[in-house]
């Protein structure tokens, strides 16, 4: 798939190195070798995070833009609209599709499909929105035993999905950038062509809210049940992302070797 660009929302707190590592490995495998990731650093990419990014930067798979001075200039919610539109216009003629999402969000397509097939099926649309699957970043699945659980990657052990019924959850989106004049945080309202809002059977994203800024072991509460009520909120065990953990680790090892094995969690 030619020229895909990914944008990460600018991060003003210090990011968790391990979470960034696994997010990149997962999505570089997911989107394929012709994808490229664009990260905007508003201060969250400290030294350890940059070392986790370095192998992918050297391979030409990741670009980092330093926008740390953005806080000096007033703009809504850390200048997010400025950042997404900078990304849109900087790369609009280099990418067939752009996905706009954050480092605590994991894209997913059903096992029998590939992301390329999904994109081809949505070719007639200039934009489509992506439904959220909210995951807990406070409770973890301990089915492997506590000792082995702590050695797992974050998306392997944070396996409980929030099933509380709410009117609406935030969505993320993808666009064909040459059809878009300006964009926003959760979708574009300035484009030519059609927008599709019913893509949940084709693509979804799993949101581990709050996990990126913890900078510590996320598992403070372990459960080994298929259904859990925690802090008066219902959760169900969902191993959708967990199940690809081994494949993601093997992809990282094949692509950049053992350069990140000593990354601290």
Image (tube, rainbow, N blue to C red):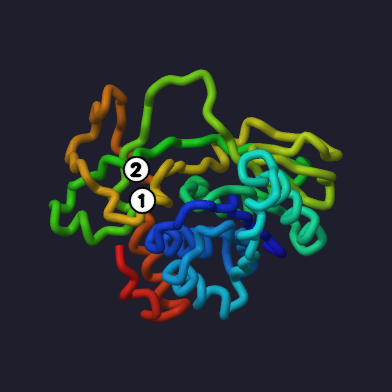
Q: Report the quarter where the N terminus lies.
A: bottom right
Determine whether the residue tagged by mark 1 lies in a helix, strand or loop: loop
Determine whether the residue tagged by mark 2 lies in a helix, strand or loop: loop
- Residue density around tag 2, few if under 14, some if 14–19, many if 20 or more, within 10 Å: many
User: At 32% across and 53% down in the image, what residue appears?
Assistant: 156
* Residue topped by disc 1: 214
Q: Position of residue 238 (x, y in %)?
A: 34, 40
Q: Position of residue 107 (x, y in %)?
A: 52, 48
In the rendered view, would you say 98 is above or below 265? Answer: above
* Residue topped by disc 2: 137
- Residue density around tag 1, few if under 14, some if 14–19, many if 20 or more, within 10 Å: some
Q: What is the distance, in whole Å, between disc 2 and disc 1 at their CAs?
A: 9 Å
User: At 67% across and 59% down in the image, what residue appears?
Assistant: 5
* Nearest to N terminus: mark 2 or mark 1: 2
On the image, which quarter does residue 230 sit in? Answer: top left
In the rendered view, would you say 177 is above or below 195? Answer: below
Q: Is residue 250 left or right of residue 93?
A: left
Q: Position of residue 10 (x, y in %)?
A: 59, 53
Q: Report the quarter where the C terminus lies.
A: bottom left
């Amino acid at each position: 798939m030619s020229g895909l660009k990914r944008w990460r929302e600018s991060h003003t707190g210090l990011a968790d190195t391990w979470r960034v590592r696994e997010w990149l490995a997962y999505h570089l495998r997911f989107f394929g070798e012709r994808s490229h990731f664009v990260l905007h650093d508003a201060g969250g990419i400290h030294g350890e995070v940059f070392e986790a990014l370095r192998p992918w930067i050297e391979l030409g798979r990741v670009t980092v833009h330093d926008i740390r001075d953005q806080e000096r200039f007033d703009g809504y919610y850390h200048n997010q609209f400025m950042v997404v539109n900078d990304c849109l216009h900087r790369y609009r003629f280099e990418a067939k599709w752009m996905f706009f999402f954050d480092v605590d969000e994991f894209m997913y397509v059903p096992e029998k499909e590939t992301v390329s097939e999904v994109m081809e099926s949505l070719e007639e649309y200039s934009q489509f929105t992506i439904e959220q699957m909210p995951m807990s970043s406070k409770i973890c699945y301990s089915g492997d035993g506590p000792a082995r659980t702590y050695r797992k990657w974050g998306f392997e052990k944070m396996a409980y999905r929030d099933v509380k019924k709410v009117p609406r959850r935030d969505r993320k989106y993808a666009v064909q950038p040459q059809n878009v004049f300006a964009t926003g945080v959760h979708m574009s309202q300035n484009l030519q062509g059609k927008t599709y809002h019913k893509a949940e059977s084709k693509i979804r994203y799993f949101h581990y809210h709050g996990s990126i800024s913890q900078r510590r072991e996320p598992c403070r509460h372990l459960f080994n049940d298929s259904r859990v009520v925690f802090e008066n909120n219902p959760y169900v065990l969902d191993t959708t992302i967990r199940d690809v953990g081994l494949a993601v680790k093997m992809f990282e090892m094949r692509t950049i070797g053992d350069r990140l094995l000593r990354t601290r969690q």
